[in-house]
Amino acid sequence: MNNNNLKGVLLCGGKGSRLYPLTKVINKHLVPVGNKPMVYYGLEKMTEAGIKEVLIVSGVEQCGTLIEQCGDGKDWGLNLTYKVQTEAGGIAQALSLAENFAGDSKLFVILGDNIFNMPTKDLTNNFSTGAKVFLKEVSDPERFGVAEVVKKMSMYGNQVQVLSIEEKPKTPKSNLAVTGLYMYDNTVFDKIRTLKASARGELEVTDLNNLYLKENSLIAEIMPENCWWTDAGTFESLAVANKLVNK
């Protein structure tokens, strides 16, 4: 399968401060998980989804080592290009750097420090407009964007209606975290331009997703119970990721 009207964006920004001192001399996304660098998992999922064109957005820190490691993408059957995020402006700001790369295409976006085993081969087949997010039940939802949902009968099985998404809530309305896997149509860049920085000075992906929610064009799907997902951006979650992939 070749998704000609879908391009991939792998967001590998950030300083990796939560993994210091590992990240003092190595890009966070090159930290090993199992027997390979963290970034490889996202690249493999892009290939599995049938995507050929992928943009890697990297932070300034050790971006050269990331480029050296991943090269032009031929090891994954991909055509890789790179863009540098010169400031820590948040996920939505990093995604905005993909505008010229995207052209008229829709986007399949993965956070570089998120690792999951859900198959992506047919994941993009029914996506046409709006945005799509994937949810997973977690034990510590206060660490993530949390979705309040209503389950509904759907031909797609795990699809749910989102009522609200709240970023790192002190009192979560559910235990459903918004994972680092997204799909966006080409209106995403106009929406990002309307965002205001959050209290921590970043353009939040939760605010972006809420814009799609307000116009009733956000689709949400709960990951199947037999699929796992974790971020690997802290020592605790990195240990979880290693345990999961080594199974």
Image (tube, rainbow, N blue to C red):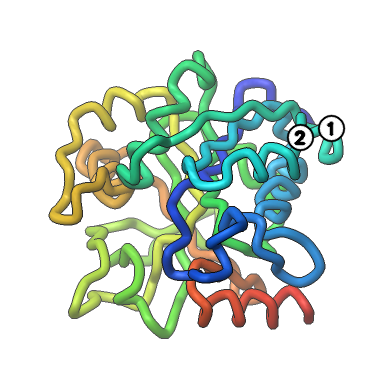
Nearer to me, 185 or 217: 185
> Quadrant of the image for the N terminus?
top right
> Going by the image, does 149 lie left or right of 247?
left
Q: What label does residue 71 carry, if any?
A: 2
Q: Are marks 2 and 1 in contact (CB under 8 Å)?
A: yes
Between 184 and 95, which is closer to the camera in this rendering? 95
**Residue 207's spot in the image, x, y percent?**
24, 47
Compared to residue 135, the image places residue 173 above or below, namely below
Q: Amino acid at mark 2?
A: Gly
What percent of the width, then of the height, locates residue 202? 24, 47
In which quarter of the view is residue 186 placed?
top left
Question: Identity of the amino acid at label 1?
Answer: Lys
Q: Say if residue 149 shows up in the picture.
A: no
Question: Which residue shows up at 49% across the image and 69% down it?
Answer: 20
Q: Position of residue 66 (x, y in %)?
A: 65, 44
Tell me, yes or no, if residue 158 can be seen here. Answer: yes
Please report the residue visible at 38 percent of the width from the left and 46 percent of the height from the top: 91
Q: Residue at x 75, y 49 (%)?
A: 44
Left or right, 217 with respect to 138, comes to left
Q: Secondary structure at mark 1?
A: helix
Residue 163 appears left or right of 187: left
Residue 74's disc number: 1
Query: Alpha-carbon neighbours of circle 2 within 10 Å: few (<14), some, or many (≥20)?
Result: some
For the residues carrying marks 2 and 1, which lies nearer the camera in this image?
Answer: 2
Disc 2 from disc 1: Cα separation: 8 Å
Q: Nearer the viewer, residue 83 or 170?
A: 83
- Number of numbered discs overlaid on the protein picture: 2
Looking at this rendering, what residue extends furthest in the front direction? 25
Is 200 or 101 nearer to us in this picture? 200
Residue that appears at 19% across and 48% down: 201
